[in-house]
Image: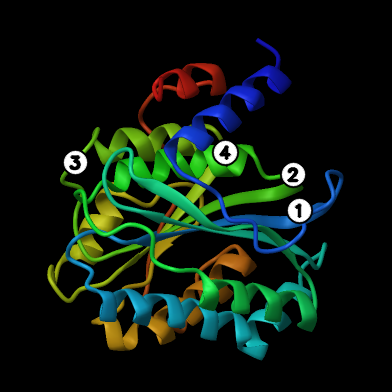
Amino acid sequence: MSFRSALCIVAAVAALLGPARAQSPPPALDAEVSLALVLAVDASGSVDNHRFELQKRGYAAAFRSPRVLASIRSLGTPKIAVAMMQWTGPRLHVVVVDWTIVKDEASIGALADAIDAAPRQLFGGGTSISGAIDFSRLVLAQCPCKAARRVIDVSGDGSNNAGRAVRQARDEAVQDGVGINGLPILTLEPSLDRYYYDNVIGGPGAFVIPAENYDTFADAILKKLISEIAGKPDESIRSIASDKEPSHGVTNLANFVATFR
């Protein structure tokens, strides 16, 4: 199967899994970016509406920080592409902010506004971090940019309790050249940062930056975004870094998409 055919399958599967809400015109097909970043936001049953709003506002506030734009401008190619999705159960996901190129004050402001305006679309169904990783890979496959790095940013307040083994999803993503970083919220599971380190993050330089609770989420995501854009964790902040190698076999795109049929 050609890569173009595989992408067509990916698009069809993604349409079945959840509607996408385009917040801005799609990036040019030939745009080169330093980073393609999927923000995977927990919308499971343990996240009430207040907690969800704290997550969403934290992301929006982080992108409005001058430090994030300064980090983007310091890159060799001073552009990144960002999309946001919500996740709960193994097949419950939805893209709420479509791919947006961020390179200046106007584009980063537009992204922050789109995050602020994106409504919550999922309200329960389990906590499937493996499903979030798998769907984020589909979203990355649809990115219309040429990205030097591809990263999934997973935030959540619980361990994987639905769907396939999270380590399998992680290792297959890493084998495909996708990095995974984690932002565990420790409100319900105080050792969730250790769980994310052992089971969720992957790829060279992968890291965890925990939020002690939802009230500190905004500060944690700001630190995390700066580290993700730079491609390495800031040694001055509390983080857990990993250079572990994946242990499971590679899954090509066609076989990966087939798992969603």
Marks 2 and 1: CB-CB under 8 Å?
yes
The C terminus lies in which quarter of the figure?
top left
Residue assigned mark 2: 144
User: As shown in the figure, which amino acid type bears the numbered disc 1?
Assistant: Pro
User: As shown in the figure, which amino acid type bears the numbered disc 4?
Assistant: Gly
As drawn, the label of residue 177 is 4
First in sequence: mark 1 vs mark 3: 1
Q: Where is residue 75 in the image (x, y as percent from the top left)?
A: 76, 68
As drawn, the label of residue 181 is none
Classify 10 Å Cα crowding around label 4: few (below 14), some (14-19), many (20 and above): some
The N terminus lies in which quarter of the figure?
top right
Q: Residue at x 52, y 78 (%)?
A: 116
Q: What element carries label 3?
A: loop
First in sequence: mark 3 vs mark 2: 2
As drawn, the label of residue 162 is 3
Residue in front for this viewpoint, 15 or 60: 15
User: As shown in the figure, which amino acid type bears the numbered disc 3?
Assistant: Ala
Q: Where is residue 89 in the image (x, y as percent from the top left)?
A: 26, 45
Q: Is residue 5 left or right of residue 243?
A: right
C-alpha span from label 1 to label 3: 33 Å
First in sequence: mark 3 vs mark 4: 3
